[in-house]
Image (cartoon, rainbow, N blue to C red):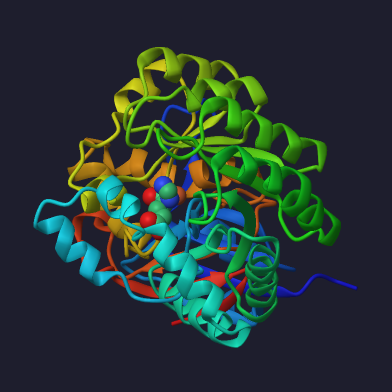
């Protein structure tokens, strides 16, 4: 069967293809086009050349991107987007000076969302997540990692992961599931006993159902120590789950070094990471996932991208969309990466696309090179600089998922 020409996006002022060959910046094409067949990019380059070989009139969808920009779909590699309840009052409390740790210690924060998730029906959880997937798609996210971790018992963790699978099957956004039973210690438990429950009960059940790809832990003072995190992540590896680590978020604990030691796919947050941490992450090929929305919402100091850039580490920017950081928009994360963390627009857009793909071990996306998935965002604006520039008003004209226009 000859391939179906799904879409030709043509006459864009700029196509932001992805990293250039030597990884020193982006490759962009002026007056460019992208052709997608059978869900994959089959040609990218100047409009004349692409449309000569792949005439838009032969495509299921011809997308006129005149004056606009075409980018790879955003790959949001760190979220806790499956939740229930309302924690807006904690936002107000933080503005009055309460810290994240104060709120957590008083049974608020994560533990409050745990109570709400345990009480919510599967249907309500799914409805909430599908609404949020619509929201993220509207600002160009085509792949969204989502963590469990608001169940903290086997039954609810499995329910969360089942909801992620159901949402993935029903919605065009790809949902990548991460098991995070080690997100907090439930009120009723003592930490070591809970670690054992994660290792001996939760992990085997999750692995048996094959419902998660990654295993994440919150390695933080007062939550899980490095030793406890190691125990959980090593058990995860035995069950075929690839490690991720919430590392050096509120304090420096050694989670980044642990991520390197265990061959994690990413170390995330890293607000308090040192130069040495950046060096070992680079050396072991662990992607550094920076989450400027979290620092913004906590009023904390941002992670320092220069540290990771100088060390030669792969950097991703993600949203950390969760009830404590109600920030679903990747373009807004890119704005914060630029304005708050000092990244250049091209660097931040690469981190939000290609970097995100690295943090999820998905070499098939985050770029518009031939062979990549036909996931792209068309902006009604002339360059990628408009992603961070126009914060609060992302001019998304269309989103394509595997060559299908899923939003316009
Ligand atoms: O990545 N650090 C831990 N987890 C989340 C917060 C989740 C929550 O507050 O509900 C984070 O910031
Ligand atoms: Fe997180």
Of the pair 236 and 141, the residue shown nearer to us: 236
Classify the position of the C terminus by image quarter.
Answer: bottom left
Q: Position of residue 124 (x, y in %)?
A: 54, 86
Q: Please give the count of numbered marks on the rendered protein.
A: 0
Q: Quadrant of the N terminus?
A: bottom right
Query: Who's the residue at 27% across and 36% down the image?
Result: 343
Relative height, residue 305 to residue 29 (above, below): above
Give coordinates of residue 63: x percent, y percent: 49, 76
Residue found at x 37% / y 17%: 310
The answer to whether residue 324 shows anywhere in this view is: yes
Determine which quarter of the picture holds residue 70.
bottom left
Q: Position of residue 300 (x, y in %)?
A: 20, 41
Closest to the observer, 255 or 187: 187
| Residue located 25% across and 49% down the image | 102
Horizontal side of 193 relative to 355 (left or right) equals right
- Left or right of residue 297, residue 37 in this image: right
Residue 362 visible to the viewer: no
In this view, which residue lies farthest toward the left?
96
Give left or right: position of 143 versus 93: right
> Which residue is found at the position 64% from the left and 42% from the top?
193
Q: Nearer the viewer, residue 31 or 254?
A: 254
Q: Closest to the observer: 99 or 58?
A: 99
Residue 143 falls in image quadrant: bottom right
> Is 51 above or below relative to 284?
below
Q: Is residue 60 above or below residue 284?
A: below
């Amino acid at each position: 069967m000859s391939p179906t020409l799904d879409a030709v996006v043509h006459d864009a002022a700029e196509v932001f293809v992805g990293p250039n060959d030597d990884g020193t910046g982006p490759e962009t094409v002026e007056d460019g086009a992208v052709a997608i067949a059978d869900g994959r990019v089959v040609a990218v380059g100047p409009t004349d050349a692409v449309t000569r070989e792949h005439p838009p009139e032969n495509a299921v969808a011809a997308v006129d991107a005149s004056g606009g920009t075409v980018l790879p779909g955003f790959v949001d590699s760190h979220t806790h987007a499956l939740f229930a309840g309302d924690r807006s009052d904690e936002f107000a409390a933080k503005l009055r000076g309460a810290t994240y740790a104060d709120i957590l210690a008083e049974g608020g924060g994560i533990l409050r969302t745990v109570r709400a998730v345990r009480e919510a029906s599967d249907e309500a959880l799914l409805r909430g997540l599908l609404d949020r997937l619509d929201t993220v798609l509207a600002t160009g996210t085509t792949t969204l990692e989502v963590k469990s971790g608001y169940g903290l018992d086997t039954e609810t963790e499995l329910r969360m992961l089942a909801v992620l699978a159901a949402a993935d099957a029903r919605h065009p956004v790809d949902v990548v599931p991460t098991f995070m039973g080690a997100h907090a210690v439930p009120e009723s438990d003592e930490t070591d006993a809970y670690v054992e429950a994660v290792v001996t009960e939760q992990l085997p059940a999750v692995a048996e159902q094959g419902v998660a790809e990654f295993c994440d832990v919150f390695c933080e003072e007062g939550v899980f120590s490095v030793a406890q995190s190691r125990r959980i992540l090593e058990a995860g590896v035995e069950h075929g789950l690839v490690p991720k680590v919430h590392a050096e978020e509120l304090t420096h604990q050694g989670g980044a070094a642990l991520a390197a030691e265990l061959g994690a796919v990413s170390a995330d947050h890293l607000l308090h990471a040192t130069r040495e941490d950046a060096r070992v992450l680079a050396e072991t090929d662990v992607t550094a996932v920076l989450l400027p929305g979290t620092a913004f919402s906590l009023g904390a100091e941002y992670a320092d991208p220069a540290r990771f850039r100088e060390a030669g580490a792969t950097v991703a920017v993600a949203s950390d969309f969760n009830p404590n950081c109600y920030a679903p928009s990747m373009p807004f994360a890119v704005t914060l990466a630029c304005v708050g963390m000092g990244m250049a627009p091209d660097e931040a857009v690469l981190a939000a696309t290609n970097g995100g793909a690295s943090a999820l071990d998905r070499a098939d996306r985050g770029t518009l090179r031939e062979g990549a998935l036909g996931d792209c965002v068309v902006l009604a604006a002339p360059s990628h600089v408009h992603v961070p520039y126009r914060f609060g008003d992302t001019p998304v004209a269309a989103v394509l998922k595997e060559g299908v226009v899923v939003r316009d």
